[in-house]
Amino acid sequence: MKKITSLLAGMTLALIALPAIAGIVINQKQNVVSGANNRDSEQTIMLQGNKQKMITERHTIITDLDKGMMYILDPKDKSYFQIDFPPTGPMGSMMAAGTASSMNFKKSGVTHDIAGYKCTDYQGSGHVMSGDFTIKECFSRNAPGASEFTAFQKSMASKLKASGAAPIAASSEIPDGVPLASDSTMKMGNVQIPGMSPDQAAKITQMMANRPPIVTKTVVTKVVAQNLPADTFAVPADFTKKDIPHGPAMGGMKMGAPAAAPSAAAPMPH
């Protein structure tokens, strides 16, 4: 009995000594410019374990890697729809086309102090269905939750790559740390949309040829580590489930996170 009591006591002490799985809350400001159009916005990223929540001015996107599910919420309408993650079928084809085939990040060695933490610039480029882009992100390994953030990013990228839903670069190529700032430029053109005929793609590419590039600048204003309650990543009980939208409605959804947000996807137009 004494041995069992001692064993239980030892296990209890070991569990108490284990660090709690802390969540991460990241606040960002973003500016998007395309010709005469100039838009400022704010967004919040919440992450804990294998769950992530992204809150923008229009939508909230919850990704649960454990359940293999993504929920897209419309707070104004109190509605949501859900898709499998990684997605399959037409949704998988859309995500594959909307995700960078390769980021090719290269370390520049330039460092900055942002939101109270040092970060290092990495540069990359790639192609999505809307066009070609270049991106520069400043990753910090000493910001709160950097290891947890990196683990989620690589797990998400690995699942997408393994499923074939998105031919993104290998997860080992994603720089470690939290991206505290990002500058990206996307030149519209060379359109490759699933299911679209070559003639249609050529016409749209020609229409977009003279469009100004989309320049997106994102900066983290605050990043903290804190334990987040489980319902942070749950769909509110008073939200109504709807069918997955298609066509223009789905095209207007920013499925890929913008630069400096937790996603290996390239920035997409708003």
Image: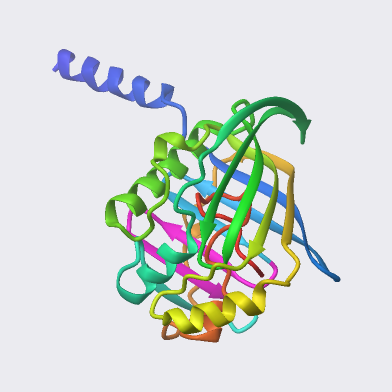
Residue in the foreground of this view, choosing between 225 and 265: 265
Residue in the foreground of this view, choosing between 108 and 201: 201
Quadrant position of residue 54: bottom right
User: Percent position (x, y) of residue 26?
Assistant: 65, 46
> Which color scheme did the rendering employ for the protein?
rainbow
User: Percent position (x, y) of residue 92?
Assistant: 36, 68
User: Percent position (x, y) of residue 176?
Assistant: 52, 32
The reply to whether residue 2 is visible in this rendering is yes
Quadrant position of residue 34: bottom right
Residue in the foreground of this view, choosing between 155 and 238: 155
Asked if residue 128 lies in the magenta stretch, the reply is: no
In magenta, the rendered stretch is 57-75
Q: Residue at x 51, y 45 (%)?
A: 103
Q: Residue at x 51, y 54 (%)?
A: 265
The reply to whether residue 79 is visible in this rendering is no
Q: Residue at x 45, y 43 (%)?
A: 152
Q: Residue at x 53, y 65 (%)?
A: 61
Would you say 40 lies left or right of 224 here?
right
Would you say 124 lies left or right of 215 here?
left
Quadrant where the N terminus sits is top left
**Vertical order, 220 against 6 (above or below):** below
Quadrant where the C terminus sits is bottom right
Would you say 21 lies left or right of 220 here?
left
**Vertical order, 1 against 263 (above or below):** above
